[in-house]
Amino acid sequence: MLTYRDPLPHTPHRVLLLGVTGVGKSTLGKTLSELWGLPYTNLDEIHWGPGWTERPGFRDEATALAATDQWITEWQYWSKGFKNTLGDRADTFIWLNFPRPIAWQRLFRRTLQRWRTREEAYEGCLEPPIWKVLTDENHILRWEAKTHSTWREREPSLSEEFPHGTFIELRSPRQVRHWLSGPALEQKR
């Protein structure tokens, strides 16, 4: 497992971003896309349709994405079969392993902002009222609380399961900034 200080041993071509909701995977994906010249696809954007329903064609689009030679995306939708579809093809895995207070604060701020401004998270997808966190089992803030430790439980076996990939762990926004201005910048195309 590499850290924010370690140089990358290869030029990334297919990059998976790991971490709990709200830690900044999409932001990092866009930044790396510009830096490395790789196309970034937000997997949530091709997954979510109006009213928070799965878009028809999501599986085909995600599978087609995995088959291409260059990409950056988030590693999610394992329950829909995309653990191996994406993991088998990735050469670089970047884990945003932030402490719960940082992850939760970022998610809360984003959720509240989208709810207040009625900004769509994805096409036809509006955040429910913030108070719904008390009654909706699937509210994004409750989802974060339920799944925050998931990556920490999963990660130890992932580098063994996908030995072809380089794994990088970034533990704070400061480490992300340091990594972007050092080892990641060295891979600029």
Image: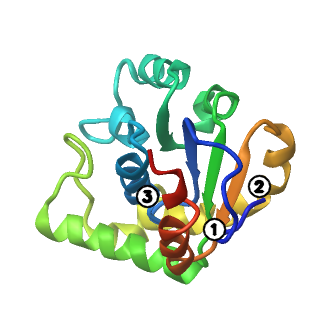
Q: Which residue is mark 1?
A: 97
Q: Secondary structure at mark 3?
A: helix
Question: CB under 8 Å between callouts 1 and 2?
Answer: yes
- Cα distance, mark 1 to mark 2? 10 Å
Q: Which residue is mark 2?
A: 155
Name the N-terminal-most of marks 3 and 2: 3
- Cα distance, mark 1 to mark 3? 13 Å
Q: Amino acid at mark 3?
A: Leu
Name the N-terminal-most of marks 1 and 3: 3
Name the N-terminal-most of marks 1 and 2: 1
Q: Which mark is residue 28?
A: 3
Query: Looking at the rendering, which quadrant does residue 133 occupy?
Result: bottom left
Q: Position of residue 77 (x, y in %)?
A: 55, 38
Question: CB under 8 Å between callouts 3 and 2?
Answer: no
Q: Amino acid at mark 1?
A: Asn
Q: Position of residue 128 (x, y in %)?
A: 27, 60
- Cα distance, mark 3 to mark 2? 19 Å
